[in-house]
Structure formats: C-alpha cells, structure tokens
Image (cartoon, rainbow, N blue to C red):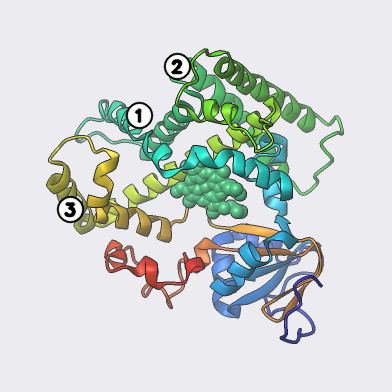
Amino acid sequence: MDNTRAAPIRRGLPPGPKGTWIRGNLRQFSDQRLKFFLDVGRTYGDLSSFRFGPRRIFLATDSDLIEQVLVTDAKHYIKHFGARAYKPVLGNGLVTSEGEFWLRQRRLSQPAFLKNRVLSYAPMMTQLTDRMLSHWRPGELMDVHFEFSSLTSAIALKTLFDLDDPGDRERFTETLRLAFDLMSARFRSLLRLPTWLPTPANLRLKRAVAELFQVVDGFIAQGRARKEPGDDLLSRLVAAQDDDGTRMTARQLRDEMMTLYLAGHETTALTLSWAWYLLSQHPAAEEKLVAEWQRVLGGRTPNADDLPNLPYTEAVLTEAMRVYPPVYLIGREATCDLELGGYRVKKGYTVFMSQWVNHRDPKYFPDPEAFRPERWENGLARRIPKYAY
Ligand code: HEM
C-alpha cells in the first residue's frame, strides 16, 4: 500500500446497508438516491460501504477522511466511474482529466480564473441580468429555472466564447442538450455496450457528438481568427502558455470550453433557482434580503465593489447551496490498495463523498433541514472543518 499509516488496518469492510446478491444496493439508490445516501451516512457514520452491482463503494462523511481522499492521497485516486462516463462529450477537460495532463491544463487555465479576472466579468453579468429582468412583469408567473438557466447560459457563452448571437446560442445549447441526453440515457441503461459498436443508440450519440464538436470548433475558429484577442476566456486560454512555451491544441481548447460551459452554467442556475424557491417559502428572509439591497444599492444595478457590503445576500446563497447543493456527490476511484479510516480501500474501489449528507450533519448545522441564512452571520464558515461544506 502506498499510504500505510501507523494505525492497524481492520479486516473486512466498513458497515453498510444490506443489498441483494447481484445488484447490491442499486435498487435502493435508484428509488431515492438522496435519501439513500443520507440514510447510509446517518446510520453508519464516518465511513460506510455498499455495492452497485459488482462495484464496491465507500461513503466517507467525516471531513478528515474527505480531506485524505481529495488532498493527502489525491495522487492515488482518479475520478470515479460517473465522471468518466461524460468523457465522450467532455473529452479530457479539467473535470474528467487526470494526473500530469490535468495539472498542466489546470496551470494553463488558472490565470483566467484569478479573482480580478473573474470580477472583470461583473458588468457583463449584470447587463445580461438587466436584460432578463426587463421582460419580467410584476404579478406574472415565471418559470424561474428556465429564466435562470437561460441567464447563466448567456453569461457562460459570453464570458467563455464572446458569443452574444441568439442563433449561435440556440445552436450550441440544442446540440449540447441532445448529446447530453443521449449520453445520460446510455449511462442509465443497464446494458451498456461499448461505444464503438454500431448500435442505433451509439450511432445517434456519435452523430450528436460530432455535430456538437463541429459547432464548438466553429466558435473556437472564430475566436482564433479575431485580430484583437477579446476579454473572453477562450481568448485567454488561446493565449495561455506553459513555461516551455507550448499552448493548448484545438482539441484541448474544445474539451476545456465544453467542460467550463457545463460545469459553470448548470450549477449557477441551480443555485439561483433553489435560492428563489427557498425565499418564496421564507418571506422574512426575502424581506431582509430586499432591505439589504435597498440600503446598499438604493435601486441601482450592483457592481463587484458592492459584494463586501452585501453579507446577507452572501448568506442566503451559501445557505441555499447548503440546503440544496447543486452538486450533491463527488467520487474518486483508488488506483492501488490504500488505507482509509482504518479500513482497506482496494484498487478499483470507489469512494463517494456527498454534499447532501455533509450539509445535513447536525454537528455543524443544527436543525439542518431548516433554511436559516443567519447561521452564516457570525463566521460559521471559519469555525466548521474545511470539508464539512
Ligand atoms: C454554484 C456553483 C458551482 C458549484 C456548486 C460547483 C461545484 C463543483 C464541485 C463540487 C467540483 C469538484 C468536482 C470533483 O472534484 O469531483 C467542481 C469542479 C470544477 N468546477 Fe465547479 N462549481 C460551480 C461553479 C463553477 C463555475 C462557474 C465554473 C466555471 C466557469 C466551474 C468549473 C469547474 C471546473 C473546471 C472544475 C474542475 C476543477 C479541477 O478539477 O481542476 N464551476 N465544481
């Protein structure tokens, strides 16, 4: 083992729910996945185990164990099977890539994510938000998730590719949705034949992915052809250079752009939608939020400098992401036999860590089901362990 520690390793597996002989705990998971993880975490504690078919899975809920997997022993883990399943669309972008390649891409991308760079997008974000709000009418019933998804998609396409044209946007989101739906259907199906087999489903997926790639390659070619590099992320990634002067290839650019679009727009839309839902259920919090905006902004459009003066706004979003985390699960797969929490994680085992479970730990968040932005007001973020949220 590569991470042997002084503590002796127990025989067997961490405790966990009983499953069936062939499917293990897949049925319980498929029926109600969030409840399944929460029940397992609450019943069996810091480290538990179960099985999805032949796959052995550990669930780590203790923040030290999570740190061990994600940080201390990171080099002995790769991304889990669920993340890898998105490779046909995301290729080798930051979310799906590994090891040295990931590190190099991460270093190349990092400057584009410096705080000031990100803050420089604020005027464009508020402008697109104003555009959305200009067609909201008082008293009208809105599908907020549709509104926020369109908004964050527009923001992502503008910040990533400098794309503002509604036609371009539609082409991209339509081709992406089709490819993603087909891939998710493949992931859900029990009989998953290799992608190279020319089955009707595989051929449909292949055609959808080819069309999507053609659209994104077109955007990248447009971006590269511009005489003056823009402020968008694509321009920054095109210009990014490694210490040895190498740049990203067209393929790498495409993978990173797709990854950033997907990772960035759905998560932020979900955050806003759930926050709005929670506010609709908690009028006192909504009143306090609006009062803060009136006091600090007095009706004008905010800018990045206002952020430090909007602590309740931050608390509302932090609390919304605690109660309804946009990403509820992350996972890693062991590349060699390892130790975790006194047990042996064999090569090929998966370790899951669940925001849904951790954010409902009453040790750190008393009355965890309650939406209470005030809990963040007196420095809670600094008092809880780093991996509890
Ligand atoms: C509320 C908003 C967001 C949430 C909750 C969120 C959540 C996460 C989580 C949990 C991971 C870790 C996944 C893992 O290691 O298995 C992750 C990684 C990542 N996210 Fe986000 N994210 C958000 C917004 C964004 C945005 C706006 C972008 C880009 C524009 C983005 C880009 C990425 C990338 C590139 C990674 C992979 C990083 C790496 O491994 O180097 N995310 N995100």
Residue type at mark 1 is Met
Q: Disc 3 designates what residue?
A: 287
Instruction: Say which residue appears at 49% left-offset and 22% top-offset.
Output: 169
Q: Nearer the viewer, residue 367 or 87?
A: 87
Q: Disc 2 designates what residue?
A: 165
38 sits left or right of 116 in the view: right
Q: Nearer the viewer, mark 3 or mark 1?
A: 1
361 sits left or right of 147 in the view: right
Dot 1: element: helix
Q: Quadrant location of residue 53? A: bottom right
Measure the alpha-carbon separation of dots 3 and 2: 37 Å
Instruction: Say which residue appears at 31% left-offset and 58% top-offset.
Output: 315
Measure the alpha-carbon separation of dots 3 and 1: 27 Å
Q: Position of residue 209 (x, y in %)?
A: 69, 27
Measure the alpha-carbon separation of dots 2 and 1: 15 Å
Q: From the Cβ of disc 2, is ligand 1 less than 8 Å away?
A: no
Task: Give the mark nearest the N terminus, 2 or 1.
Answer: 1
Give the crowd class for mark 3: few <14, some 14-19, many >=20 residues within 10 Å. Answer: few
Q: Position of residue 290 (x, y in %)?
A: 18, 48
Dot 3: element: helix
